Image (tube, helix red, strand yellow):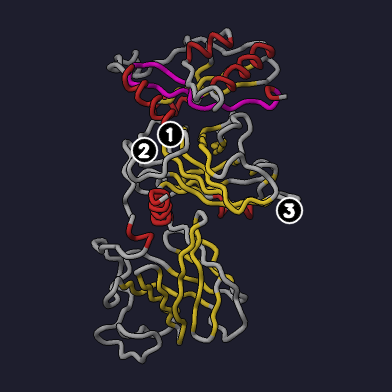
Amino acid sequence: MERLKIAVALLIAAAMLLSLTACGDKGPDVSGKYICVGESYGGEYSEPYSESWIDLKEGGKGTYFSGFEFNLKWKLDGENFTGTVTFLGMEETMEGTLKDGVMEVSYGDMKLRFLKEGAEAPQNGTAGSETTGGEGTAAPAGLNANATVAGSIADAFSGAVAGGASALKIGLPSTWYGWLYFEDVVGFNPGAEYLDGWGFIDTDNTGKPYFEVFRDGDSENPMLSMYMTIEDNGTCILPDIGNEDAWIFDTYLTPADAEQYQAFLVEDGTLISTFDYVSYTGEYSCTVTMCFREDGTAWDEENDLLPPRYDEYKATLEANNADSEPKPQPAAGGEYGKTTPDADGIVDFDTLKSGFAWLSNATSYEGGYQRPTYEEIAKQLGADGKKTHESSWEQDYHVYEWVTTGGDFLLLSFKVHEDGSETWNSSSWSNSLKD
């Protein structure tokens, strides 16, 4: 249980998913933006380690920023500011004072000082004291890249994850493996509180990027599906939600949902996101946290919160490593592939549908996370695939398409390994194949 607490605390540090929950009572108008100007770990305030601020809205709502923006609820009783930080069912008290434009709150062993925009900075003493603007003023002076962060739950485990060969950027296409955590579940059974999960990033037949998440036990129906873009130098998934083209479980997402469904790649290569689900009827709801690493990456078994079926995943990695051989020389033109140059990928509908059913079963959780080779899939479909999405071929991924004359399609991406073999990575298909 202690290891679980450590891993959860790490994720708080990695993603800074802080949500202050309380009720906003009536009182003086203290709304406005408060900039973090000091941090203390038992002594005097020093420069903040990184940018953060709180924007208080009327009615007890607001925004907290510490790397990313999150919703904020707050309560002020006289000068007493109180809140509760919650994450994965864990709670940590945050409390302090708000007086004369200065907010000072304690969290674990750390104290934070925020200054309202336009207010004067206090001396290194109590909030609200008169200031001269001279020595001892804890005003912003830029970020201190050499600052040592320690003290709170979040700080104590900063940087503890150290998995091998983690992704530095979100690839397109790419496959992600990890866990899903469900809390505050109302009205339905997600399968378990803590499940293995898979994330797939690829493009549809029009070339539009999408992101889908599957939970253990249901490999055919994505619990989350949405179009997206990759921003911030390859470290952030931004949802691109249109009209009824994105969903969570049984409910369509709207453009207004885009902000909370972002996913972030933190420095250790972990792709993480926390979002709320409320069904269109209002009967079902929960909060979901997902934590993925790129497929093929070993996790830090001493510090990471491991997926429930990680031992099976690890065994597959070790088997693949044992079978690896030196990469062959590429064919003329700098490419190699398993299709024939003139393959058009045309097959009849029944063959395409049966091949799709075979592939869905082979790659399902129930099927043992198999990764069929190109040759195995082409044999099921009775034809070589048509080479497509040529830009992906420059990233050790090959994409092939099988189609019918009526427009039905199965678009598959394959990971190219060092020995030249190509194994299934992700799929996109026409709806007719699932009817």
Residue under pointer 1? 310
Using the rendered view, name the quadrant where residue 204 is placed. top right
Type of the residue with mark 2:
Trp
Decide: marks 2, 1 in contact (CB < 8 A)?
yes
Residue under pointer 3? 282
- Mark 3–mark 2 Cα distance, whole angstroms, equals 37 Å
- Secondary structure of the residue carrying tag 1 is helix
Q: Residue at x 69, y 45 (%)?
A: 251
Q: Which mark is residue 366?
A: none
Mark 3 vs mark 2: which is more N-terminal?
3
Q: Which residues are magenta?
A: 413-432
Mark 3 vs mark 1: which is more N-terminal?
3
Vertical arrangement, residue 207 with respect to residue 319, above or below: below
Q: Specify whether 238 is left or right of 5.
A: right
Q: Residue at x 66, y 17 (%)?
A: 353
Q: Which mark is residue 299?
A: 2
Q: Residue at x 50, y 75 (%)?
A: 82
Type of the residue with mark 3:
Gly
Q: Is residue 225 at all visible to an observer of this figure?
A: no
Q: Specify whether 29 is left or right of 234.
A: right
Mark 2 vs mark 1: which is more N-terminal?
2
Give the x, y percent position of residue 284.
70, 50
Q: Specify whether 316 is left or right of 209.
A: left
In the image, 408 versus 217, the foreground residue is: 217
In the image, 288 versus 340, the foreground residue is: 288
